[in-house]
Image: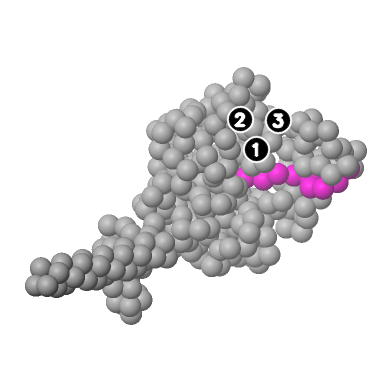
Amino acid sequence: MKRHNTILVFSLTAALAAAVLGIAILSSRQMDKDYPTTDLVPSALPLNKVEREGILRFSTQAISTDTFIDRRSFESSWSHAKRVDVSSGVVAGVVNHHVLAADLMAGFFLSLKRSAPQTQRFIVISPDHFFSGHGPISTLDRNYSTPDGLLRSDTAFVAELVSSTSAALEDNAMFEREHGVGALAPFIQREFPEAKIVGIALQGTMDRGLARDFGTSLAGLVDSHTVIIISSDMSHYLPAKTALANDSVTIDKLKDFDTAFFATVKDDHVDNGVGLVVLASYLDALGIKHAFHLVGHGISSDYVSDDKSTTTYINGLWTR
């Protein structure tokens, strides 16, 4: 009987210990899910203490570009890419983020590498496609994990950007699904392995005066080894004939840099008009007299059979 009681007590103790351990593990997993652990937030810190002291920080893990383009498509894009030779003195560019036309993206960065091989920083200005930013201008300080290695964030520049402009440093979720920046990252890393990235996303409804002010502020932060990239697709959802006719207008506006046009343009011509407003202000603030060079033009019906609802792509570089 005594032995039986001892076994029973032991069993109950073991069961209780297992239950406590199970609750602790589940609580830890839930905490990690809601609040990813970083070097600044100890994983053992009680949740209520984290909330009370307001010391939650953002994830420091690199964002995988596999989310935005599969590796097979990325690799095959280079064999179909066409490089265009453009004179030196590149200060900015515009490139598609729709990876259906990944060969145009590869051709853009091949052309850029030929013209501006010493570029050390890329400021990629994307639409905030999902309107998930905490303000009209969003940025991040996380790296991107690409098939060729780590594309590093220029964290010092991002910190200065946040402190001196209206840009907001965003949390984990936003840029983990923002293809306007993430889809470009592996192409930058392939051609410019030593360069750093500054990702920015703009809400399309943002005040155009704020956009111009932001472009002016941006001009005061950069150096001569910086290139601004406007991440933008062009015409959306139109029949091919109409879409290509609209592209002819858009190309002329890019050459003239018609700011009034881009301030009011809709998705039937450009999906990042506000980004082009920022760029125009940026170039004006630097006093750069620029010329536009077309390096790629395509339409989604070149890749899939649907010519009733299309997306178009106009890629180019601005030089001094």
Q: Give the amino acid at mark 2.
A: Ser
Q: Quadrant of the image for the N terminus?
A: bottom left
Label whose residue precedes the other's in the sequence (1 or 3): 1
**Range of residues picked out in magenta:** 230-239
Describe the element under mark 2 as helix, strand or loop: helix
**Measured Cα–Cα span from mark 3 to mark 2:** 18 Å
Whether 281 is drawn above or below 230: the answer is below
Instruction: Kindly indicate the quadrant of the structure image that contains residue 209.
Output: bottom right
Residue at 82%, 48% in the rendered image: 237
Label whose residue precedes the other's in the sequence (1 or 2): 2
Mark 3 closeness class: few <14, some 14–19, many ≥20 residues within 10 Å: many
Taking the view exactly as shown, the residue that stands out farthest to the bottom is 52
Q: Which mark is residue 73?
A: 2
Q: Give the amino acid at mark 1.
A: Val
Describe the element under mark 3 as helix, strand or loop: strand
Q: Is residue 113 rendered magenta in the image?
A: no
Instruction: Kindly indicate the quadrant of the structure image that contains residue 57.
Output: bottom left
Q: Give the amino acid at mark 3.
A: Gly
Give the labeled residue for mark 1.
Answer: 99
